[in-house]
Image (spheres, helix red, strand yellow):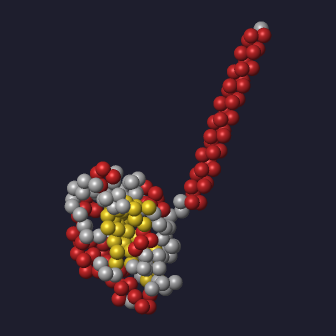
Amino acid sequence: MKKALLIIVIMLYVCESKAYNVVKSIYSHIDSIADTTVKDVPLGIGDKMEDFKLYDYNDNVHYLSELQGNYIVLVFSSITCGPCQAIKPILENFYRKYKEQVKMVTISGDPVYLWKEKPYGEVSWHEWNDHNCGAKIRRKYGIKLIPSFILIAPSGIIINICFDTKSLFKTIETYLQNEGNMEKGVSSSSHIVPM
């Protein structure tokens, strides 16, 4: 009888301990979700850009802030994305025309080994990778599909988020034409709103 009672006490202790660990785990998960929700709110139009540590093909470290003072276009892309590859010649022509005023960076969503193969050749603008398939930077900028483009003003403020080259080019050209008046403006894909 004493053995049976001892076994029951031990089982209750083990079950209670497991239940405690499960409840503790659930609360920990809830806390981490709440923490993530606050920290990982995607940036939007009018927000200050966030900087990230990125690498070029030679593993040199770069930061987006290196380009501040110019208009910056972040091109979110992947080697495995057909539309991303199809627009490269269009982006190349545009970049050649505006490279003095606009700096472009492709943020690769590819694993490093695949990205470094450059199966579709190189472009004349920056192509950087965070060595993490772009996960953190995509999450921070709210990128859910590719290709996507973020346009950042010389001041570091996000002025446009778009998903096609036509709206991207139209917004950049509008800003460049009105550069003196609209340095601090923000834009949606269809209009510009002064800040």
Q: Is residue 154 above or below residue 161?
A: below
Q: Residue at x 42, y 66 (%)?
A: 63
Residue 87 vertical placement versus 19 (above, below): below
Q: Position of residue 185 (x, y in %)?
A: 47, 83
Q: Is residue 63 rendered to the left or right of residue 99?
A: right
Which residue is most to the bottom?
181
Q: Is residue 58 visible?
A: yes
Residue 160 figure quarter: bottom left
* Residue 27 in the image, given as x and y percentages of width and height: 65, 44
Q: Is residue 187 visible?
A: no
Q: Residue at x 28, y 55 (%)?
A: 116
Q: Residue furthest right?
A: 2
Rendered residue at 23%/75% (across/down): 93
Q: Examine the image and state in which quarter residue 52 appears.
A: bottom left
Residue 130, relative to residue 70: is it above or below? above
What residue is at 44 percent from the left and 87 percent from the top? 182
In this rendering, the count of numbered labels is 0
**Is residue 10 shown left or right of residue 159?**
right
Q: Looking at this rendering, what residue extends furthest in the top direction?
A: 1
Quadrant location of the N terminus? top right
Q: Which x, y percent locates residue 159?
A: 44, 77
Image spot of residue 114 (x, y percent): 29, 51
Q: Is residue 78 left or right of residue 25?
A: left
